[in-house]
Image (cartoon, grey):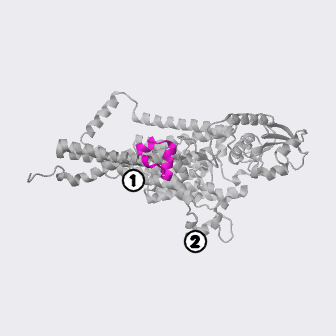
């Protein structure tokens, strides 16, 4: 009829973007559903190699198109039935459903096979997902906040909760974090001890620190024969004065299991001060999300399974320090700084970075200046006076690629950085180090990179990890050096959320960032962490097994039986994986070098001789009459005693391949 307008003519332009959003969201959800319906093998083949037969591919295509057109059909039907007054509702629905447009990426984000086949590609995909998800979640939350019925629903929900007489939010969220912390501590205590019983720990470093603590409780602080068989002071390697305050706890039950439990407990319950700090800046639910995300952080899990290290404990004390600074508790600030200085010399450099951040951002300039100066002075005294007096060590060799003028020292490294910055920058440009940095920031939805000033917090971490040139563990997430990053990453994430809260619709922006962080943290933790799946997790140098086979139990029982034959006061040298189990004594040595003087016993694991102990074992047993076999188990574990005579000694030497 003349003059009659088309049904959709009046709002064709207004509906274009909502229609496209609904189409993409429906299609994306259907792709995710179809991928999840595949078997894991078929899904991995499809994601990695695009392997799918033509019939299945046609079926997938049909389903995803149906998924896209289904919400469009629903919107069209609503328009036909209710006319233009339904247009705002369609626009609002498209805004609320916008995050669903990313659903198709979820199967890839949670693909263990894809993540380990190409870690860099996986991390880039997760990072891109995080960048796209924050604005989409924000659109969704803003749309829900501005919906006409939302205030009524929110008020009704609040009244309902009050009527149920539940605990206050403060109690609820604090209890939630404490329970999550306890669960972490229990989980990691159990499985790190299990790994120890499977002979997954080593002389370097669990044997070192257990032997160090045993000597300390017997009046010999900083004596550690496993590290310095010829005699030496542990302060020459690291200024770890934490030995002194840990003595009362270790003395309750001396042994490597105590070290592992203490590490798991301190790392787990670090979530509590993190929550308390975050709650001073954010709402309690948001603070709880940040604290639980910390417990799922994969760069925390690897170090927790790599024996024991004082550096690994730092998040617990850093988070209390952040809380003390936020609440202006001077005494707690001083106590936490002292504890941190006691853990390792390089932790003072971390605090220099924090102090500079507080000064230059003017958050707490006076405190920041004091922290910077005190930390710099302590590091100079520690590294330049105390440690050299104790002896020499080789850690500067981790920067050997930056040495200048033939001088092997940290001063030489500084010369290179200042005089040849281009060489310095290109020295740490590698795929492995890019992956390392992405492992740090991607699970936090890139929040730590939201402000340029946050870089000040990471200068120390970069110096001790990605700026090194001579050691891959420094830039691998399964080692303790991630502890230079972890506390400051979460500090930066909290501060980024604070900044977001000052924007228009700040609350919704914060919720969007936290929802994104929850998704990417779960995905990354599933693929690389220790909690959500156990097939591929790596701690230290090796993949961790989360169960003990019958063979493992027999081997551990055999080892315990041989260890029980050694008098407590005897000196013992042992191969690498057996050494932690004999380290609870004054004189325990590693079979990495020939003992400087003869020891009373040798404990040898045949499968653990390898290149590391071969030469030392041959040299120690060079005289066939010096050590005799006391006992052996399953042709695998051998106990020799100096001066002992045994007819089985010759066959044991032959089995061990002694030359």
| Residue that extends furthest to the top in the rendered view of this protein | 164
638 or 469, which is in the foreground?
638
Q: Position of residue 185 (x, y in %)?
A: 57, 37
Q: Return the residue at label 2.
A: 420
Q: Return the residue at label 1.
A: 132
Q: Is residue 28 above or below residue 550?
A: below
Residue 53 left/right relative to 484? left
Q: Is residue 328 visible?
A: no
Q: Position of residue 555 (x, y in %)?
A: 73, 36
Q: Residue at x 31, y 52 (%)?
A: 504
| Residue that extends furthest to the front in the rendered view of this protein | 55
| Labelled pair 1, 2 in contact (Cβ < 8 Å) | no
Q: Earlier in the sequence, mark 1 or mark 2?
A: 1
Mark 2 element type: loop
Q: Which residues are magenta?
A: 31-55
15 or 360, which is in the foreground?
15
Q: Residue at x 57, y 47 (%)?
A: 314
Q: Quadrant of residue 74?
A: top left
Residue 311 left/right relative to 77? right
Decide whether the magenta segment is chiefly helix, strand or loop.
helix
339 or 473, which is in the foreground?
473
Q: Nearer the viewer, mark 1 or mark 2?
A: 1
Please tell me how crowded label 1 is: few (under 14), some (14-19), or many (20+) other residues with Cα within 10 Å: some
Please tell me how crowded label 2 is: few (under 14), some (14-19), or many (20+) other residues with Cα within 10 Å: few
Q: Residue at x 69, y 54 (%)?
A: 237
Q: Does the magenta portion include 48? A: yes
């Amino acid at each position: 009829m003349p003059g009659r307008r088309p049904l959709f003519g009046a709002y064709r332009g207004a509906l274009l973007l909502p229609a496209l959003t609904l189409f993409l969201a429906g299609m994306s959800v259907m792709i995710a559903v179809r991928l999840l319906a595949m078997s894991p093998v078929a899904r991995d083949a499809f994601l990695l190699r695009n392997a799918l037969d033509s019939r299945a591919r046609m079926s997938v295509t049909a389903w995803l198109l149906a998924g896209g057109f289904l919400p469009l059909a629903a919107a069209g039907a609503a328009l036909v039935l209710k006319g233009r007054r339904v247009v705002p509702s369609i626009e609002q629905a498209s805004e609320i459903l916008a995050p669903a447009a990313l659903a198709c990426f979820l199967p890839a984000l949670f693909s263990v096979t894809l993540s380990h086949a190409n870690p860099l590609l996986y991390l880039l995909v997760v990072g891109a997902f995080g960048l796209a998800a924050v604005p989409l979640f924000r659109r969704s939350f803003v749309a829900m906040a501005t919906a006409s019925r939302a205030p009524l629903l929110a008020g009704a929900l609040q009244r309902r909760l009050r009527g149920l007489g539940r605990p206050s939010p403060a109690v609820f969220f604090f209890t939630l974090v404490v329970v999550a912390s306890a669960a972490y501590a229990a989980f990691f205590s159990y499985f790190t001890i299990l790994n120890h019983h499977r002979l997954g720990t080593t002389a370097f470093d669990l044997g070192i620190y257990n032997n160090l603590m045993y000597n300390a409780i017997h009046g010999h602080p900083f004596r550690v024969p496993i590290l310095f068989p010829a005699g030496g002071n542990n302060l020459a390697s690291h200024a770890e004065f934490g030995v002194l305050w840990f003595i009362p706890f270790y003395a309750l039950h001396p042994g490597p299991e105590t070290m592992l439990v203490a590490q798991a407990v301190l790392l787990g319950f670090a979530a509590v001060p993190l929550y308390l700090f975050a709650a001073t800046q954010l709402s309690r639910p948001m603070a709880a999300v940040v604290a639980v995300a910390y417990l799922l952080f994969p760069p925390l899990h690897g170090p927790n399974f790599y024996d024991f290290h004082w550096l690994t404990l730092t998040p617990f004390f850093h988070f209390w320090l952040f809380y003390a600074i936020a609440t202006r508790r001077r005494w707690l600030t001083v106590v936490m700084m002292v504890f941190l200085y006691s853990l390792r010399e390089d932790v003072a450099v971390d605090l220099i970075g924090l102090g500079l951040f507080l000064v230059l951002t003017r958050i707490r300039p006076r405190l920041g200046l004091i922290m910077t100066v005190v930390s710099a002075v302590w590091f100079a005294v520690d590294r330049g006076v105390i440690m050299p007096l104790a002896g020499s060590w080789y850690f500067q060799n981790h920067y050997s690629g930056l040495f200048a003028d033939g001088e092997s020292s940290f001063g030489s490294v500084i010369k290179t950085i200042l005089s040849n910055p281009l060489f310095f920058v290109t020295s740490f440009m590698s795929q492995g180090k890019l992956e390392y940095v992405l492992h740090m920031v991607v699970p936090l939805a890139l929040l730590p990179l939201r402000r340029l000033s946050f870089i000040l917090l990471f200068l120390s971490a970069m110096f001790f990890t990605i700026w090194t040139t001579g050691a891959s563990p420094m830039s691998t997430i399964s080692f303790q050096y991630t502890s230079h990053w972890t506390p400051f990453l979460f500090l930066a994430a909290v501060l980024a959320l604070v900044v977001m809260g000052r924007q228009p619709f700040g609350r919704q922006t914060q919720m969007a960032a936290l929802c994104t962080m929850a998704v990417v943290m779960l995905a990354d933790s599933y693929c690389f962490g220790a909690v959500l799946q156990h097939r591929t997790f790596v701690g230290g140098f090796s993949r961790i097994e989360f169960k003990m086979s019958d063979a493992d139990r027999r081997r551990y029982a055999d080892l315990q039986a041989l260890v029980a034959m050694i008098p407590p006061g005897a000196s013992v040298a042992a191969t690498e994986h057996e050494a932690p189990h004999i380290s609870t004594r004054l004189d325990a040595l590693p079979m990495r070098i020939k003992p400087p003087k003869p020891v009373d016993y040798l404990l040898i694991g045949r499968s653990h001789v390898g290149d590391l102990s071969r030469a030392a074992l041959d040299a120690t047993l060079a005289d066939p009459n010096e050590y005799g076999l006391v006992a052996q188990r399953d042709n695998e574990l051998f106990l020799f005693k100096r001066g002992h005579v045994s007819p089985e000694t010759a066959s044991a030497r032959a089995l061990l391949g002694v030359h």
